[in-house]
Image (cartoon, grey):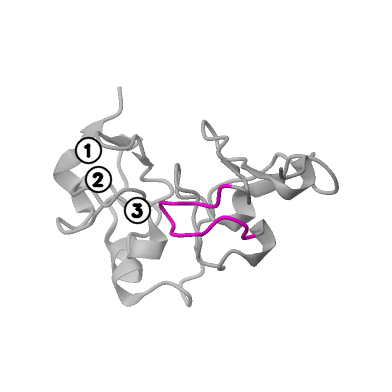
């Protein structure tokens, strides 16, 4: 049985997923027995899509830090061409609505965008490409509804 020091919890708002090395991550195809430290750098929380930086151990050093945010790339030198173009073309309007995936509950926040998938921060839902899919479950854009 894994010790609390070996289990890591996602610190993103409304998530709380706990990675347990005794269980692994079926969705991410991580077998049982893989320590959190040994997860691939591109591994994501199966619930909210947060990166490894969003996790803290349940106990021990580092467990009290609770200031995690979903990582956002804002350095234009690191954005792909598509994300940089979307950033330059974004429209400055009233606060943009968030959209929720009807399949898994992922929330697309225009302020955050989805830089890992060529959607720059500040991209309104209307400007998200039609072929974009949910970064958590892969649902298409038509599977999203405005957040109430």
Outermost residue to the top: 148
In front here: 83 or 19?
A: 19
Mark sitting earlier along the chain (2/1): 2
Indicate the secondary structure of the residue bearing disc 2: helix
In front here: 58 or 23?
A: 23
Distance from disc 2 to disc 1, alpha carbons, whole Å, reads 10 Å
User: Start and end of the magenta stretch?
Assistant: 23-34
Q: Residues within 10 Å of mark 2 (few under 14, many from 20)?
A: many
Mark sitting earlier along the chain (1/3): 3
- Spot occupied by residue 41 in the image (x, y as percentages of width and height): 56, 68
Query: Who's the residue at 74% across and 49% down the image?
Result: 6
Q: Residues within 10 Å of mark 1 (few under 14, many from 20)?
A: many
Q: Which residue is mark 3?
A: 135
Q: Residues within 10 Å of mark 3 (few under 14, many from 20)?
A: some
Give the mark toward the camera: 3 or 2: 3
CB under 8 Å between discs 2 and 1: yes
Residue 17 versus residue 88 in the image, above or below: above
Disc number for residue 125:
2
Q: Which residue is mark 1?
A: 144
On-image quarter of the C terminus: top left
State left or right for residue 64 relative to residue 18.
right
Query: Who's the residue at 50% across and 59% down the image?
Result: 30
Distance from disc 1 to disc 3, alpha carbons, whole Å, reads 12 Å
State left or right for residue 142 relative to residue 24.
left
Asked if residue 2 lies in the magenta stretch, the reply is: no
- Spot occupied by residue 114 in the image (x, y as percentages of width and height): 38, 56
Mark sitting earlier along the chain (3/2): 2
Distance from disc 3 to disc 2, alpha carbons, whole Å, reads 15 Å
Asked if residue 32 lies in the magenta stretch, the reply is: yes
């Amino acid at each position: 049985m894994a010790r609390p020091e070996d289990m890591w919890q996602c610190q993103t708002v409304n998530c709380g997923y706990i990675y347990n090395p005794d269980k692994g991550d079926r969705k991410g195809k991580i077998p049982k027995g893989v320590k959190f430290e040994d997860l691939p750098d591109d591994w994501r929380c199966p619930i909210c899509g947060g990166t490894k930086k969003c996790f803290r151990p349940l106990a021990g050093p580092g467990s009290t830090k609770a200031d995690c945010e979903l990582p956002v790339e804002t350095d234009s030198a690191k954005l792909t061409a598509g994300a940089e173009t979307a950033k330059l073309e974004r429209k400055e309007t009233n606060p943009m609505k968030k959209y929720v995936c009807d399949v898994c509950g992922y929330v697309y926040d225009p302020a955050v965008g989805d830089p890992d998938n060529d959607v720059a921060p500040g991209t309104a839902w209307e400007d998200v490409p039609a072929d974009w899919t949910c970064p958590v479950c892969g649902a298409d854009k038509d599977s999203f509804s405005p957040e109430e």
